[in-house]
Amino acid sequence: MQTPRPGKALHHFKTGEKVRFIDDRLGRWPPGKIAGGADGKLTVEVEMMERIVPIIVLPHQIERA
């Protein structure tokens, strides 16, 4: 209920761009790359335990690395 409504330009991230997590719960996760986005949310691919794990985040939870 408290997530922002989807719009045309809710973020300025591009696919393949390196980002890191800044949110309190996700802040200690390794950096990743933007894989895509829809409905105001972004998918970040992070390498953990020798696998690529997709994580869905909001734009305010990440910043450019």
Image (spheres, rainbow, N blue to C red):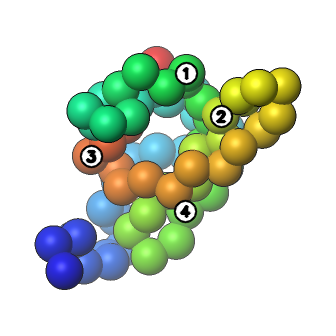
Which x, y percent locates residue 52?
78, 38
Q: Badge 2: how crowded within 10 Å, few (<14), some, or many (20+)?
A: many
Hey, what amino acid is under mark 4? Gly
Give above or below for 27 relative to 6: above
Q: Which residue is mark 3?
A: 60
Number of the front mark, 2 or 4: 2
Label pair 3/4, CB-CB below 8 angstroms: no
Residue 37 is tagged as: 4
Q: CA distance from mark 2 to mark 4?
A: 15 Å
- SS type, badge 1: loop
Label pair 4/1, CB-CB below 8 angstroms: no
- First-in-chain label (4 vs 1): 1
Query: Observer-nearest residue: 7 or 3?
Result: 3
Question: What residue do we see at 77% from left, 26% from top?
Answer: 49
Q: Badge 4: how crowded within 10 Å, few (<14), some, or many (20+)?
A: some
Label pair 2/1, CB-CB below 8 angstroms: yes
Residue 62 is tagged as: none
Q: CA distance from mark 4 to mark 1?
A: 19 Å
- First-in-chain label (3 vs 4): 4
Residue 64 visible to the viewer: no
Which x, y percent locates residue 24?
25, 32
Answer left or right for 60 relative to 38: left
Hey, what amino acid is under mark 1? Pro
Q: CA distance from mark 3 to mark 1?
A: 17 Å
Q: Report which quarter residue 34 is drawn in.
A: top right
Give above or below for 31 relative to 26: above
Query: Observer-nearest residue: 19 or 30?
Result: 30
Query: Observer-nearest residue: 2 or 63?
Result: 2
Q: Which residue is mark 2?
A: 46
